[in-house]
Image (cartoon, helix red, strand yellow):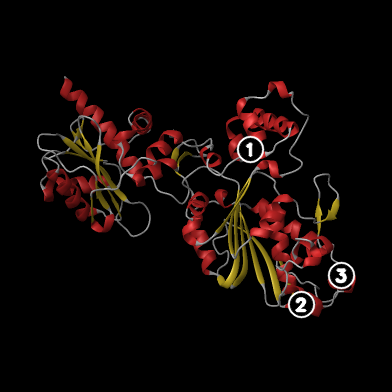
Amino acid sequence: MCPEELSQGDLERFGGILDQHPVSLRGRTVMMELAEKLLQVRTREGRTAPLKANAAQMKFERRRGERNIVLKARQMGLTTWAAARFFLKTITRPGTLTLEVAHSQEAAEEIFRIVHRFVDCLPEKLREGPLRTSRANVRQIVFPEMDAQYRVVSAGDRNAGRGLTVQNLHCSELARWPGDPAETLAGLRAAMAPGAELILESTPDGVGGCFHQEWQKACETGMVRHFFPWWMERHYRTLAVDEASLTCEERDLMAHRDLSLEQIGYRRQIRADFRGLARQEYAEDCESCFLASGDSVFELEAIEKRLATMTPPVEQRWNGELEVWLPPIKGKAYLVAVDPAGGGSEGDYSAAQVLELETGLQCAEFAGHMGGLELARLVTGLAVEYNNAWLVVERNNHGSGVLALIETVCGCGRVYRQSGQAGWLTTSMSRPAALGRLDAALVERPECFQSRRLLDECRSFVRLPNGGSGARPGTHDDRVMAMAIGLGARAELVGRASH
C-alpha cells in the first residue's frame, strides 16, 4: 500500500475491511496497518512519528467489540488509539459522524490537536483530494467529499450530541465528567445510530460514580471490558532495584505478572510520589484502583466487607421503595429518622431509616420521590408499626412542612424535639458530627447495616472541592443523611434516658 496513491475508492474499500486480520499482516488488523501508514502522533520525546500500536492498543484492538468500556492506568495511549480508530472509520466510510466527548474543555482541545495532526500529516494527494476539509467551528472537521464529520466536545456542553446521529462515540475520562454524568451519557447514547461503536474510557476515580457503575454492570449490558495495568506501558520503568530488597508483595508481582526489577523500581517511585493515590492513578487490578480514591468520606474497606455478607430484605413495599429486614419485636424501642425532600419526580429522594433504639440496628429503609402529606402519613405509619417509635424529622427546608402535617393531620405523639422545638436541625456543626458517628459505626459495627442501597450511597459520598461533603455527581446521599440523622438522634435519646 502506497499512501500517496490512495483514491477515494481505495479508502472506501479499506472501510469495509478495517477489522479484518489478513494472514499477510501476521496477527495485525488492517486498522493497525493503516494507522501506521497514514497517521502521525507526537511522541513522549516531542517528535512526530507514525502511530504504531503499543501493547495496550494492540490488545484493545484484538478484543474490541461494538460496545466497550476501558479501565486503565495513566497515559497508556488508549485515548489516542480511540481517536485514531474513529478517525480512520470516519475517512473510509462515507456518511460517518464521529463524536469525541472529553471531561473538560482543555482535554477536548488536546484531543482535537491529536485529530488535527492526523489530518495535517496525511499525504498531500489525500489532503487536497478526497480528504479535503472544511471546518464549521473550532472543534469540528468536515470531509465534504466523504460526507463525513469528526467532532470533539466537552461533557460540560449540555447540548453535546443533541440532534445528531452518531456512528462512533468515544467518551473520554468518564469518571471525571462534571454535573450528572449518567444523564449526559444517556443523552449521548440516544444519539447513537443502530450498530454504532461505543468506547467508554477512563482512569478510576472512586466507587459509586457513573464510570464505576458502568464497569460493574458491563457483563449485564453486553459491554466488552478492557483493563490495562500500568506495566503494559513499556516506558514505565526506571533503575533496577536490588533483588535482596524485594518485599513479599513485590516478589509475588514479579512471579505472577512477569515484572522486571526496573518495573519494580518504577513502582516504588510512583508510590513515593503519589502515595495513597498510586493505586488509583497507576492501576494494578480492577478492584483496588476504585477503592484507592482519596476523596471518600467513609472507610471503603469496611463498606466492601459488609457488602460481601449482606442478605436481601424479608419484605418489600411501595414498589420496592420500602424494604424491611427486621420486623418490630414486642417490647423493643425504635426510632424513625426522616430526611424529607420536595417529592417531585426529579432531584433528591425523601428517605427514612428505622433503627432499633438500644443497638442502632437498621430494621427498615424507605427512599422515594414522595413529599408533603403522603410522606407524613408513610413515616407516621412506620412509627406506629414499630411500637410507637420516636419520629425524628429533619426540620430544614421541606422538613418544617412535613413536621407540621405529622403533628396536626397525622396526630403522631412521639415527635423528637431539640430544645423544645420539633425536629432535627442540620447545621454546620451537627452535620459533620452525625456523619462522623456514621463513619465510626461502619467500621466498629458493620453488622448493624442491612441496606445495600445505603452502603452504595456511602461508597459515593465524597469530599467536595468546596470543602464540604456530599454525593458524587450523578449519585444520591439521601439514605446516608437519614441514617446519619438517625444515629445522631439515637445517641441523644439514649443519653437522655441514662440521666
Does residue 347 appear in the picture of this structure? yes
Mark 3, residue position: 1
Q: Is residue 11 left or right of residue 312?
A: right
Rendered residue at 74%/31% (across/down): 261
45 relative position to 283: left or right: right
Residue type pointed to by label 1? His
Is residue 138 in sight in this rendering?
A: no
The residues tagged by marks 2 and 3 sit, at their Cα atoms, a distance apart of: 13 Å
Using the image, determine if residue 43 lies above or below residue 96.
above
Q: Residue most toward the top?
A: 499
Q: Position of residue 385 (x, y in %)?
A: 13, 45
CA gap between label 2 and label 1 equals 43 Å
- Mark 2 neighbour class, 10 Å CA radius: few under 14, some 14 to 19, many 20 or more: few
- Judged from the image, the secondary structure of the residue bearing numbered disc 1 is helix
Q: Amino acid at mark 3?
A: Met
Mark 1 highlights which residue? 256
Q: Which mark is residue 406?
A: none
Which of 217 and 96 lies nearest the eye of the viewer? 217
Q: Secondary structure at mark 2?
A: helix
Residue 271 horizontal/vertical position (percent): 64, 30
Circles 2 and 1 in contact, beta carbons < 8 Å: no
Mark 1 Cα-neighbour bin, 10 Å: few <14, some 14–19, many ≥20: few
Instruction: Quickly name the residue at label 2.
Output: 13
Dividing the picture into quadrants, the one containing residue 100 is: bottom right
